[in-house]
């Protein structure tokens, strides 16, 4: 067990290493309702324990935000699985001008530092990982968000096969709001709720999708609690199938079950998935009729009728 007395946490460090962190103030953008390190006044936090993000740019961004937020003698304890950024933690902290103590336990690399780091290097890392408008995409985006610097090919394919929807709908795992533009092209759509777990993606989507018919909900689609989202006319989605970098087929299957529970009888789900993912059976178990609309370039598009 790591010895720490932190009142603040970023992410969900393993219980066996960090103990129960559920009552600490959470700062991860992947936790609905969490606070944001971006909003913390400099040099005000006493300590923080962090499960570092896997991506290099987003990891250094999170580390830099933490170092900026901590008091001069504040303790930052950061850990990551060795194959998910852990072997690079020491290099990240060195690049930010920090001295640190490093150890290993349960396949994790663990670094502890009291900073303070190099102020200019910290500012540069924050600038590198901040939200930005990408001209080629025509979208606001941020490193760490799914498909942050390109249009996902599955989403692009689904956009090309969307029908003219009408009525009330939702996009499960809406990301930057790419699919919303295709859905909202139909004037018969009266409302569209974008549901996304990643707070960074949702903040970008609010800048990318400004149609008055749109609502935004940061939530985990697998355990959605939204009483107003019932008897929907349609749902679109490009569900995730990776969790922490590892393939997890159950993610998309859970999204499909959620969609089935939100649609009214006769409501339609349009879903895109990689060809190898086993979604046909769960679709047929939860919908009255399932039709493959298209199959190309390694993807399948399904229409499922509730």
Image (spheres, grey):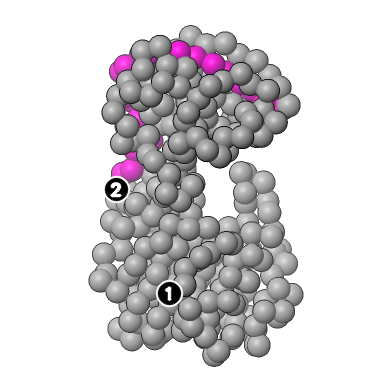
Q: Position of residue 144 (x, y in %)?
A: 47, 43
Q: Is residue 185 left or right of residue 83?
A: left
Q: Nearer the viewer, residue 58 or 6?
A: 6
The quadrant of the image that shows the C terminus is bottom right
Percent from the top left, x then y, of residue 286? 67, 79
Q: Nearer the viewer, residue 17 or 110?
A: 17
Q: Residue 195 lies in what quarter of the image?
A: bottom left
- Among the 4 quarters of the image, the one containing residue 191: bottom left
In the rendered structure, the answer to whether residue 255 lies left or right of residue 28 reads: right
Please say if 72 is above or below 219: above
**Residue at which label 1 appears:** 228
Instruction: Determine crowd level at label 1: few under 14, some 14-19, many 20+ residues with C-alpha closer than 10 A.
Output: few
Q: Quadrant of the N terminus?
A: top right
Q: Which residue is mark 2?
A: 133
137 vs 82, nearest the viewer:
82
Q: Nearer the viewer, residue 73 or 239?
A: 73
Q: Name the N-terminal-most of marks 1 and 2.
A: 2
Q: Residue at x 31, y 44 (%)?
A: 132
Name the residue located 39 percent from the left edge and 41 percent from the top edge: 35
Measuring 62% from the left and 44% from the top, which residue is drawn there?
245
Give SS at disc 2. Answer: strand
Mark 2 nearby-residue class (10 Å; few <14, some 14–19, many ≥20): some
Q: In x, y percent, where is residue 268? A: 53, 83
Task: Give the magenta-colored segment's residue range.
Answer: 107-132
Task: Give the x, y percent position of residue 185.
Answer: 33, 77
- Which residue is depicted at the point 32% across and 32% down? 40
């Amino acid at each position: 067990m790591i010895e720490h007395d932190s009142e603040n946490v970023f992410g969900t460090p393993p219980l066996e290493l960090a103990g129960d962190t559920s009552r600490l103030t959470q700062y991860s953008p992947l936790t609905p309702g969490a606070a944001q390190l971006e909003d913390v006044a400099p040099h005000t936090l006493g300590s923080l324990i962090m499960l570092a993000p896997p991506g290099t740019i987003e990891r250094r961004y999170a580390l830099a935000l933490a170092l900026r937020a901590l008091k001069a003698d504040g303790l930052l304890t950061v850990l990551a699985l060795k194959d998910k950024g852990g072997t690079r933690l020491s290099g990240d902290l060195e690049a930010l001008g920090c001295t640190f103590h490093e150890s290993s336990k349960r396949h994790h690399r663990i670094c502890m530092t009291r900073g303070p780091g190099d102020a200019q290097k910290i500012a540069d890392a924050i600038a590198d990982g901040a939200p930005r408008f990408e001209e080629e995409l025509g979208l606001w985006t941020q490193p760490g968000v799914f498909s942050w610097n390109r249009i996902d090919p599955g989403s692009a394919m689904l956009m090309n096969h969307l029908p003219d929807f009408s009525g009330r709908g939702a996009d499960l795992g809406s990301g930057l709001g790419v699919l919303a533009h295709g859905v909202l092209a139909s004037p018969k759509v009266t409302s569209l709720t974008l549901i996304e777990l990643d707070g960074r993606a949702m903040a970008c989507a609010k800048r990318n999708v400004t149609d008055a018919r749109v609502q935004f909900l940061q939530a985990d689609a697998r355990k959605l609690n939204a009483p107003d989202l019932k008897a929907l006319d349609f749902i679109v989605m490009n569900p995730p199938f990776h969790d922490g970098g590892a393939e997890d087929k159950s993610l998309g299957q859970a999204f499909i079950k959620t969609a089935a529970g939100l649609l009214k009888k006769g409501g339609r789900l349009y879903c895109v998935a990689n060809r190898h993912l086993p979604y046909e059976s769960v679709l047929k178990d939860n919908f009255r009729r399932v039709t493959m609309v298209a199959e190309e370039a390694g993807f399948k598009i399904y229409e499922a009728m509730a």
